[in-house]
Image (cartoon, rainbow, N blue to C red):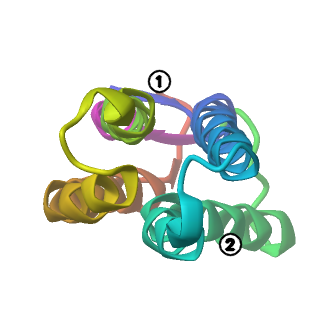
Amino acid sequence: MRIPVTDSQKRLVFIWFAGSGFLFALLLLQTFFGQYGSEAREAWGLMLPTFVPTLFLIIGILIADATGSADLDETVTVDRFFFRLSEFLSIAYLATIILIILLSPFSKFSQPELIKLSNLWLAPFQGLVTAALGAFFVSKNKTTDF
């Protein structure tokens, strides 16, 4: 089944910018209040790659769509399965990152150590999310059958 691309793209943009914005604000506040101590630069260096590349991917695709020759109206659709998969994985991935930051005070590891350790499972998770987003954006097709 196919669904209009504009609404689904807007939902994914909202998910990524809201989740990333919250994560950025959380990291900023924790840095201001000394949560990372002298390891703040390392913590930021480890966390930014977990969400910034995907934001650039999404922005790049939006710019390409806006400047491309194809009109993105209700006749351009995407595969609903790839949208739902991208939506679910995006929410789960961003929630995982946020939980790592929020629950780190309860860990036996220091926050920077926990962030470093979490990259062991976040990297493959990010790969899955990126693959799902890629499949979603590639599944665009001009049709009137949704």
Q: Which of 63/38 is in front? A: 38
Q: Let me know if residue 81 is in the magenta part.
A: yes
Quarter where residue 131 is shown:
bottom left
Kindly identify the residue that appears in the image at 34 percent across and 36 percent down.
Answer: 104
Magenta segment, principal secondary structure?
A: helix
Whether 131 is drawn above or below 95: the answer is below
Q: Earlier in the sequence, mark 1 or mark 2?
A: 2
| Image x and y of residue 27, in percent | 62, 48
* Image mark count: 2
* Structural crowding at the residue carrying mark 2, measured as other residues with C-alpha within 10 Å and reported as few (<14), some (14–19) or many (≥20): few
Residue type pointed to by label 1? Phe
Label for residue 60?
Answer: 2
Indicate left or right for 100 with 125 as reference.
right
Kindly identify the residue that appears in the image at 79 percent across and 72 percent down.
Answer: 69
The region drawn magenta spans: 76-85
* Structural crowding at the residue carrying mark 1, measured as other residues with C-alpha within 10 Å and reported as few (<14), some (14–19) or many (≥20): some
Q: CA distance from mark 1 to mark 2?
A: 26 Å
Whether 100 is drawn above or below 118: the answer is above
Label for residue 108?
Answer: none
Q: Which residue is mark 1?
A: 146
Q: Which of the two discs, 1 and 2, sits closer to the camera?
A: 2
Quarter where residue 44 is shown:
bottom right
Indicate left or right for 8 with 29 as reference.
left
Q: Which of 73/59 is in front? A: 59
| Image x and y of residue 71, in percent | 79, 55
Figure quadrant of the N terminus: top left
Whether 128 is drawn above or below 23: the answer is below
